[in-house]
Image (cartoon, rainbow, N blue to C red):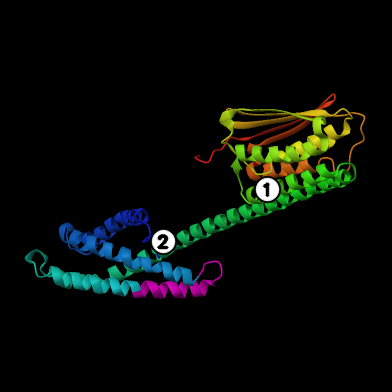
């Protein structure tokens, strides 16, 4: 559909733009045409309304001859021919209107006067149509610009989604690899615990399949998944793993990316607790501060323990996912204080009803 006819607001503005053009035509008919102001007004107003709609046909000729890919000769020939045809149609309406008005005594002889004004009306019609052509090229340029912006936005969204999916696929394999190593170690020393760990791991993975397909989940669901992960690790470490958790109730409905906390806890366990002979602790604090959700994960570690292979993969994954989801609206920091390692995450506190 024509972009002007498709929106009432645009149509109103388009018709209002014809008011000064109608005033110019009125002046030409009244002064140069000798019709007088009253007779010229009755003739000029309906003629301008009719020609305003006739000039909308320029949209189709402009689309058929794009200004970027058409030669000057083609542009000139196409639009001059269209202007002549449109003007001839307009003159037919002008003659018909004059024949109708001549039936009233006040408009006696107006048909003959209009016949004398054909050259003036023809020149005016051609100029007005060419002005309409310029307007429609501006509209086409604006639409092309909006379409390019829309496609660019879609491309950014698709790229972000692809990046998020790729990052998500790194989470489970990384975790499964570590769990399988633990199960392998337990099969020789404690087969019962190895079997229990397999059952808990299967339950955890089954839940991640459902939640991992979603782009955002409530924090309460993410915490439930985290507790399942801790249950798996508790089989391996027993009393050596101590989790201290403090979560504000009002923060439970805030939406977060799925599998956000598990890599952070896994990093604390793998590079902290597992290196301590007597075990260690992991402290998780989650709350809302203003418009942000704040997540703090702290653990103790052995400062003399050698750095394990793959250290930092989970943290880097979380950092990239936050950047892809929130851009500059999120913050991620990892700091070492003596024998303690702290990960701080701040992200927008968004809820489903927002």
Question: 243 and 101: which one is in front?
Answer: 243
Q: Is residue 18 above or below residue 263?
A: below
**What is the CA distance from the residue labelled 2 to the residue labelled 1?**
47 Å
Q: Is residue 33 visible?
A: yes
Residue 251 locus on image (x, y percent) = 59, 32
From this viewpoint, which residue is outermost toward the top? Answer: 338
Q: Residue at x 53, y 41 (%)?
A: 352
Q: Residue at x 36, y 74 (%)?
A: 84
Q: Magenta stretch containing residue 117, yes or no?
A: no
Rendered image: mark on residue 65: none
Residue 49 locus on image (x, y percent) = 27, 62
Can you tell which of label 2 and label 1 is closer to the viewer?
1
Q: Tell me the quarter of the picture where residue 278 sits.
A: top right
Pick whichever of labels 2 and 1 is earlier in the sequence: 2
Element under disc 1: helix
Residue 209 locus on image (x, y percent) = 67, 51
Q: Mostly what secondary structure, the magenta segment?
A: helix
Can you say which quadrant of the picture contains the N terminus? bottom left
Residue 175 locus on image (x, y percent) = 78, 46
Magenta segment, which residues? Answer: 66-85
Q: Which residue is mark 2?
A: 3
Q: Is residue 52 above or below residue 311?
A: below
Q: Is residue 12 above or below residue 269?
A: below
Q: Tell me the quarter of the picture where residue 319 sits.
A: top right
Q: Tell me the quarter of the picture where residue 178 sits.
A: top right
Element under disc 2: loop
Q: Which residue is mark 1?
A: 208
Q: Residues within 10 Å of mark 2 (few under 14, many from 20)?
A: some
From this viewpoint, which residue is outermost toward the left? Answer: 105
Q: Is residue 272 visible?
A: no
In the rendered structure, the answer to whether residue 181 lies left or right of residue 248 reads right
């Amino acid at each position: 559909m024509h972009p002007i006819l498709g929106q009432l607001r645009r149509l109103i503005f388009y018709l209002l733009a014809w008011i000064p053009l109608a005033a110019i035509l009125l002046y030409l008919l009244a002064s140069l045409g000798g019709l007088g102001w009253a007779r010229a007004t009755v003739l000029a107003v309906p003629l301008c309304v009719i020609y305003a709609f006739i000039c909308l046909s320029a949209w189709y000729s402009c689309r058929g001859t794009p200004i970027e890919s058409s030669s000057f000769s083609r542009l000139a020939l196409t639009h001059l021919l269209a202007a002549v045809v449109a003007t001839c149609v307009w003159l037919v309406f002008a003659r018909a209107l004059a024949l109708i008005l001549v039936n009233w005594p006040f408009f006696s002889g107006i048909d003959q006067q209009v016949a004398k004004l054909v050259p003036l009306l023809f020149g005016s019609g051609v100029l007005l149509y060419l002005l309409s052509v310029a307007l429609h090229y501006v509209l086409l340029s604006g639409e092309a610009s909006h379409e390019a912006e829309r496609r660019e936005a879609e491309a950014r969204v698709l790229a972000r989604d692809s990046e998020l999916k790729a990052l998500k696929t790194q989470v489970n394999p990384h975790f499964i690899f570590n769990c399988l190593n633990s199960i392998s170690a337990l099969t020789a020393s404690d087969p019962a615990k190895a079997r229990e760990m397999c059952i808990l791991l299967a339950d955890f993975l089954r839940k991640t399949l459902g939640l991992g397909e979603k782009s955002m989940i409530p924090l309460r669901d993410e915490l439930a998944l985290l507790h399942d992960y801790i249950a798996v690790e508790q089989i391996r470490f027993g009393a050596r793993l101590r989790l201290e958790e403090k979560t504000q109730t009002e923060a439970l409905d805030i939406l977060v990316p799925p599998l956000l906390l598990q890599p952070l806890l896994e990093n604390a366990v793998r590079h902290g607790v597992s290196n301590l002979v007597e075990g260690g602790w992991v402290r998780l604090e989650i709350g809302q501060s203003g418009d942000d959700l704040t997540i703090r994960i702290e653990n103790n570690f052995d400062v003399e323990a050698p750095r394990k292979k793959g250290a930092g993969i989970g943290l880097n994954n979380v950092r990239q996912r936050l950047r892809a989801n929130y851009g500059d609206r999120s913050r991620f920091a990892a700091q070492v204080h003596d024998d303690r390692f702290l990960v701080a995450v701040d992200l927008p506190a968004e809820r489903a009803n927002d």
